[in-house]
């Protein structure tokens, strides 16, 4: 057993270093940890953090992940919390212990043995994974964009496909350079626009045998009747128009029934040839949550929580973000799995943890505030809607203002982690470095 708690301090264990989990650990470390009022431990299965909304840019090659990933160990050192590498795979609520699976290196050699961690308060923020709904061949022949590793894997496949087409003596065959994206949510449509740009940039770097407009094709398949089905209709229609301007093939009302090494088949019998398939349709929480010592879950494995974000069966365990099913006040639905919800919940849990450490019982309750949606189509367009207190209603925005709003979301996340001064210096450094670097990742 490994227990990092010192001097019998209240030990808060946070599992999951995504945007919400890392923000919570950082803010609690800066307050409770720094002043020795509690011990904070963050557990994650990877060594580095990458803001998930950026993964489509990494997949397309328009962003170099090395320049944007954050080292958990360094962040923990700077902000007064502990970081432990590992993947949670068990829980004992009676003894208040979480179990961490052994960690192996790339060659399968065990680096860290199985461990357990004692906690006084446990916060689960492990996010979500793509839901393939059991579609035949989806797991074997498509790539999801849940992690940085998956995004980089897709980029390598895309780059290899272009290089292969450049050097082969035979004509490009159907589907060889066609990317099919299953799911027209924000990830799917943003990836399509980024791919339209980066494939043309890649072809311009010496791949003279490839005509990007003729040889490279991008298709989106969506089961609903419109792209971005969860967002306002006006926003959906605007994005649909932009995608078609880019000559992206948009197939709505088509439910995928099979994915193979040759392409994708839908329920209507349509077959779209492709050797590069991205699955971006639907989410679910990780499967192991269903067997987490009896905690209550829903049909997509999310932990069911109360308005305080406490799990329904254990008041010392909290869950938030995509892995939690939190009722939305005034609606017959749960809080949507969006980055703004995780950020709001992390802010609430900072207050909650301070109350728990002080043994105060009146915990605050979470109320979701929808500030709107923004969809970035790369250098081509950015559109969105602002809602609630921010606009006094529902205001449609586009162009430069929308793009600045979109970019500010990432900057706000970084400022939560690093502070304004550090982020300002990082931004200036990246602007200067861009003058000596290619616009896209070439390997």
Image (cartoon, rainbow, N blue to C red):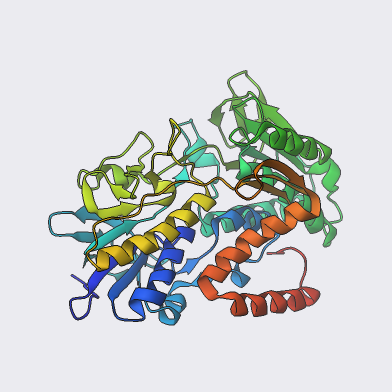
Residue 112 position by quadrant: bottom left
Image coords of residue 344 (percent x, y): 48, 55
Q: Residue furthest top?
A: 268
Image coords of residue 420 (percent x, y): 60, 75
Q: Nearer the viewer, residue 340 or 145?
A: 340
- Is residue 79 placed above or below 305 in the rendered structure? below
- Quarter of the picture containing the N terminus is bottom left
Q: Nearer the viewer, residue 157 or 421?
A: 421
In this picture, residue 34 sits left or right of residue 115: right
Q: How many marks do you count on the picture?
A: 0
Question: Which residue appears at 36% of the width and 42% of the height?
Answer: 302
- Is residue 118 placed above or below 175 in the rendered structure? below
In this picture, residue 222 sits left or right of residue 178: left
Q: Is residue 380 visible?
A: no
- Quarter of the picture containing the C terminus is bottom right
Image coords of residue 290 (percent x, y): 29, 42
Image coords of residue 65 (percent x, y): 61, 66
Residue 358 position by quadrant: bottom left
Q: Residue furthest left?
A: 94
Question: Which residue appears at 76% of the width and 50% of the height?
Answer: 165
In this picture, residue 80 sits left or right of residue 136: left
Q: Nearer the viewer, residue 300 or 110?
A: 300
Q: Is residue 126 visible?
A: yes
Q: Nearer the viewer, residue 208 or 99?
A: 99
């Amino acid at each position: 057993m490994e227990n990092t708690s010192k001097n019998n301090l209240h030990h808060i264990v946070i599992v999951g270093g995504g945007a919400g989990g890392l923000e919570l650990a950082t803010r609690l470390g800066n307050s409770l940890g720094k002043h020795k009022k509690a011990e904070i431990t963050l557990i994650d299965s990877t060594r580095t953090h990458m803001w998930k909304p950026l993964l489509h840019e990494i997949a397309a090659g328009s962003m170099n992940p090395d320049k944007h990933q954050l080292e958990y160990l360094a962040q923990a050192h700077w902000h007064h919390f502990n970081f432990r590498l590992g993947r949670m795979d068990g829980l004992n609520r009676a003894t208040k212990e979480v179990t961490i699976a052994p960690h192996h290196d790339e060659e399968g050699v065990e680096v860290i043995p199985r461990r357990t961690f004692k906690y006084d308060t446990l916060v689960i923020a492990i996010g979500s994974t793509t839901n393939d709904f059991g579609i035949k061949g989806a797991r074997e022949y498509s790539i999801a964009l849940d992690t940085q590793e998956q995004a980089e894997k897709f980029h390598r496949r895309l780059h290899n496909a272009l290089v292969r087409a450049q050097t082969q003596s035979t004509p490009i065959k159907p589907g060889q350079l066609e990317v099919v994206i299953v799911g027209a949510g924000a990830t799917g449509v943003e990836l399509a626009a980024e791919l339209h740009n980066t494939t043309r940039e890649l072809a311009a770097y010496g791949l003279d045998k490839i005509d990007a407009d003729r040889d490279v094709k991008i298709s989106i398949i969506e089961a609903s009747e419109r792209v971005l089905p969860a967002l306002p209709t006006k926003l959906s229609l605007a994005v649909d128009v932009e995608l078609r301007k880019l000559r992206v093939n948009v197939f709505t009302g088509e439910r995928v029934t099979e994915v193979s090494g040759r392409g994708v088949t839908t329920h209507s019998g349509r077959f779209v040839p492709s050797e590069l398939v991205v699955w971006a349709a639907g989410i679910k929480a990780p499967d192991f949550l269903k067997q987490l010592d009896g905690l209550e879950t829903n049909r997509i494995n999310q932990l069911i929580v109360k308005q305080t974000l406490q799990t329904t069966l254990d008041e010392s365990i909290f869950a938030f973000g995509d892995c939690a099913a939190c009722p939305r006040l005034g609606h017959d639905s749960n809080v949507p799995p969006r980055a703004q919800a995780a950020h709001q919940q992390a802010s609430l849990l900072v207050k909650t943890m301070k109350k728990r450490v002080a043994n105060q019982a009146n915990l605050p309750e979470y109320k979701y505030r929808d500030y709107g949606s923004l969809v970035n189509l790369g250098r081509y367009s950015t559109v969105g809607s602002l809602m609630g207190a921010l606009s006094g209603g529902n205001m449609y925005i586009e162009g430069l203002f929308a793009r600045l709003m979109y970019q500010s979301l990432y900057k706000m996340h970084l400022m939560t982690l690093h502070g304004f001064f550090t982020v300002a210096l990082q931004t200036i450094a990246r602007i200067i470095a861009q003058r000596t670097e290619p616009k896209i990742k070439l390997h």
